[in-house]
Image (cartoon, grey):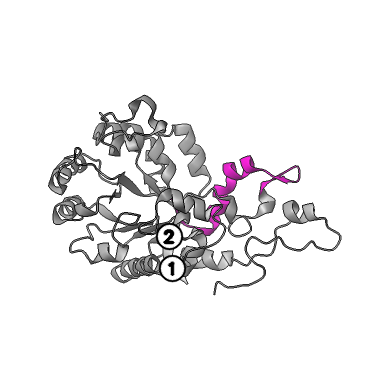
Amino acid sequence: MFSKPVRTPGATAPCAPGSSFLDTLFDLDPPLQFDRDGLRDRLRALAAKGVYIGGSSWKYEGWLDQIYSRSRYLTRGRFSKKLFEESCLSEYATVFPAVCGDFAFYQFPSEAFWTKLFRQTPDTFRWGFKVPEEITVPCWPVHPRYGALAGLDNPTFLDSRLFEQAFLKVIEPWRQQVGVLIFEFGTFRHKSFESVEAFAARLDAFLDLLPTGWRYAVEIRNAEFLEPAYFDCLRAHNVAHVYNAWTRMPEITDQLALPGSRTSDAIVARALLRRGRPYEDAVRMFSPYDRVQDVNETVRGALRELVDIALVDGQPAFVFVNNRLEGNSPATIVSIVD
């Protein structure tokens, strides 16, 4: 269904008669090996059944001539990175029914930002957003990005009022397009929480204060916290556990096999990294993310299983695939839905 072999990915198409190399490179859309329309149709059919599959972010030049038409992003006959980054979301949304907005983890975006963002996607599109780290980080990491805050306790950790006022109220006009809000908790050190019970108690108090009417999910990076106390806390609030493929987490299949891991009326999954592979290594190996370079059949199979469960049980599902899992998330998604 998805194979239309025309040319090798990443190769430059031959010049058409009467055209120059620059014409071919900048002015023409080379023939696609990637069956974009076939992928679009399959994803739309799944979305109609409540299963939304997409990438983690969308601004990847490596997807040109695959998901993106190069000719749409020309300025004076040259590819414009600025134009591409400002407007490629609209084209992304013609193929994919959903995306995870990882950018929200690093800031509380302004109303103007949100307005511009949501205008680029149709009402049927569904967003997953990572909640800003000001809510989910108990202690600021020791990293140059945090400046003078590095190593200090975060006074707004699990601050429900800040979350409601600075995040939920701002995106309220577009609530229909928000599929799931993800609280991603990085790896906790012992000084933050001595046990899963301590974390679950703090999380329970926070979730109890959240406004209803939104779909929430929690992603953790402490494998030892995948225990009944954690799952029971989420289930009490109808909050999904995020089945995540990440360097120091059990495989998704192993998480799914844990008793009680399905904690809500929705399935949420994020396929981020091969188990055991650091983020920096994946970036170095796979950039610019124009092709699959390391097939991960274990994660592919787990994602197929989650999709099948959602379809059989009639549950909504949100599955987000990162380029850094295999090298090119659109091709990984093809392998899941084909």
Q: Kindly identify which numbered label has been placed on residue 147.
A: none
Residue that appears at 20% across and 38% down: 192
Q: Is residue 125 visible?
A: no
Is residue 131 shown above or below 156? below
State yes or no: residue 83 in magenta: yes
Residue labelled with disc 1 = 336
Type of the residue with mark 1? Ile
| Kind of residue at disc 2 | Ile
Q: Are marks 1 and 2 in contact (CB under 8 Å)?
A: yes
Q: Please give the residue where the numbered disc 2 appears in the rendered image.
A: 53
| Spot occupied by residue 168 in the image (x, y as percentages of width and height) | 34, 38
Query: In the picture, residue 202 is in which quadrant?
Result: top left
Going by the image, does 205 lie left or right of 326? left
Residue displayed at 39% across by 51% down: 278
Left or right side of 28 for 52: left
Magenta stretch, residue numbers: 73-100
For the image shown, how many numbered marks are present on the structure? 2
User: Gap in Å between the C-alphas at discs 1 and 2?
Assistant: 10 Å
How many other residues sit within 10 Å of disc 2, few (<14), some (14-19) or many (≥20)?
many
Task: Identify the mark nearer the N-term, 1 or 2.
Answer: 2
Is residue 200 visible in this depiction of the protein?
Answer: yes
Q: Is residue 117 left or right of residue 194?
A: right
